Image (cartoon, rainbow, N blue to C red):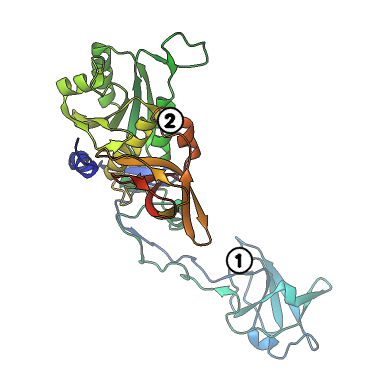
Amino acid sequence: MIPLDEAKARINAAIQPLAAVQVPIAEARGLVLAQEVLAQEDIPPFDNTAMDGFAVRSADLASATADSPVELVVAATIAAGSVAPRALMAGEAMRIMTGAPIPDGADAIIMVELTEPVGEHAVRCNSAVPVKNHIRPAGDDLKAGATVFVPGEVLGAHHLGVLASVGLESVLVTARPRVGVFSTGDELVVGPEPLQPGQIRDSNRPTLLALVAEAGFQPVDLGSLPDDDSVIAAALRNAVGRCDALITSGGVSMGDFDYVKAVLMRLGELSWMQVAIKPAKPLAFGVLLGTPIFGLPGNPVSSAVSFELFARPAIRQMMARPDTERVHQWAVADDPLLRSPDGKIHFVRVVVTQQSDGWHIRSAGGQGSHQLAALAAANGLAIVADGDGVQAGARVQVMMLQ
């Protein structure tokens, strides 16, 4: 067996970043910026009001109080998207809606809540207002020429809003990886038909496709393959031209029918590893025509844990993401997480909760590599070092899954 860190290092050393591509900003969420973005204009481009109310000259309201209001003539109404017909004169107000440009001559806004209408063409103001009251000046968010974002920025929803605000329709980013997923095995059945003796339903492929999408990659469903050397070889050759990375489940252990390992060894560069972890000890990693292939074990939990430990961080490295790894958090074990020494790190499915004194964990249920229901109940994997395990009340590091 080899240590976990060594296995990860072998994989990461073979991973190359994807090229930069131009994509519409609507498709850029979660991608890494590959260009500098500068503001081409002031944002906002003009002085505008932060409130519904009236544009006024603050000097006209210097003496206004609730007991002694000041009455002004309403000269116009300015809606968002329109401009005042002329400059504001002394003794006048202009009704104005949030976001509308400030008219020439006005230097403040009085909120509508501090006013009372007087017929159709006058307004009574019940308070004085300071100069610049509720006025958002041009360039208050960004000045023309300012650096908005630099290469390496991970684009979230709010970044995309900023890009739209500076007039960009597309942006240069490191490409989103297309990740193909195969499942392998003669025993696999897809769909609801009754199982024959020795058959099981294919749960790995739906799980892995969902994990691929959740990680920010583009999933490509490549179907299920039989335990047939020539079929697996042909499928892998075809898939490397369509995908940036491939994930298979099953066929990577030490049995006579573990064809994925054999095919990768024959067609490409293979690193077959017995990693000192539980679950997910067997792992095949290869490169075929420049495309990394992650051969994950067939047991459902082993397959999912292998994805989290090896495939997810490596493919996020292809995206140039700085946050390749899941968040790790220290927590207190509310129940003992006992084990026996076996030379492996155990990844225990746990439920993580935040309490008044910090994070706590408890077992999510059965820990067998076939018990997928406990993984569904878990939101973390407790990292339990080789030895006798963790006693109740002890602190343990947890890899968060949500």
If the image is split into quadrants, where does the N terminus sit? top left
Which of the two discs, 1 and 2, sits closer to the camera? 2
- Crowding near pointer 2: few (<14 within 10 Å), some, many (20+)? some
**Is the Cβ of the residue at disc 1 closer than 8 Å to that at disc 2?**
no
Specify whether residue 216 is in view.
no
The kind of residue tagged 1 is Ala
Q: Element at badge 2?
A: helix
Residue 207, disc = 2
Q: Quadrant of residue 297?
A: top left
According to the image, label 1 marks what residue? Answer: 100
**Left or right, 72 with reference to 255:** right
Q: Nearer the viewer, residue 81 or 150?
A: 150
Q: Quadrant of residue 216?
A: top left
Left/right of residue 386 with respect to residue 148 in the rendered view: left
Q: Which amino acid type corresponds to the residue marked 2 in the rendered image?
A: Thr
Residue 61 location, x and y as percent?
70, 86
Q: Is residue 50 above or below residue 61?
A: above
Q: Residue 24, relative to residue 220: is it above or below?
A: below
Q: Dot 1, how many residues are within 10 Å of its Cα: few (below 14), some (14-19), or many (20+)?
A: many
Q: Residue furthest bottom?
A: 63
Q: Residue furthest right?
A: 119
Is there any visible trace of residue 314 in the rendered image? yes
Q: Is residue 112 above or below residue 392?
A: below
Picture coordinates of residue 169, whole percent (x, y): 42, 48
Query: Which one is in front, 122 or 215?
Result: 215
Residue at the spot 36% in from the left edge and 49% down from the top edge: 171
Q: Earlier in the sequence, mark 1 or mark 2?
A: 1
Q: In the image, what residue occupies the spot 37% across and 38% down?
A: 217
x then y, percent, for residue 72: 75, 81
Number of dots carrying numbers: 2
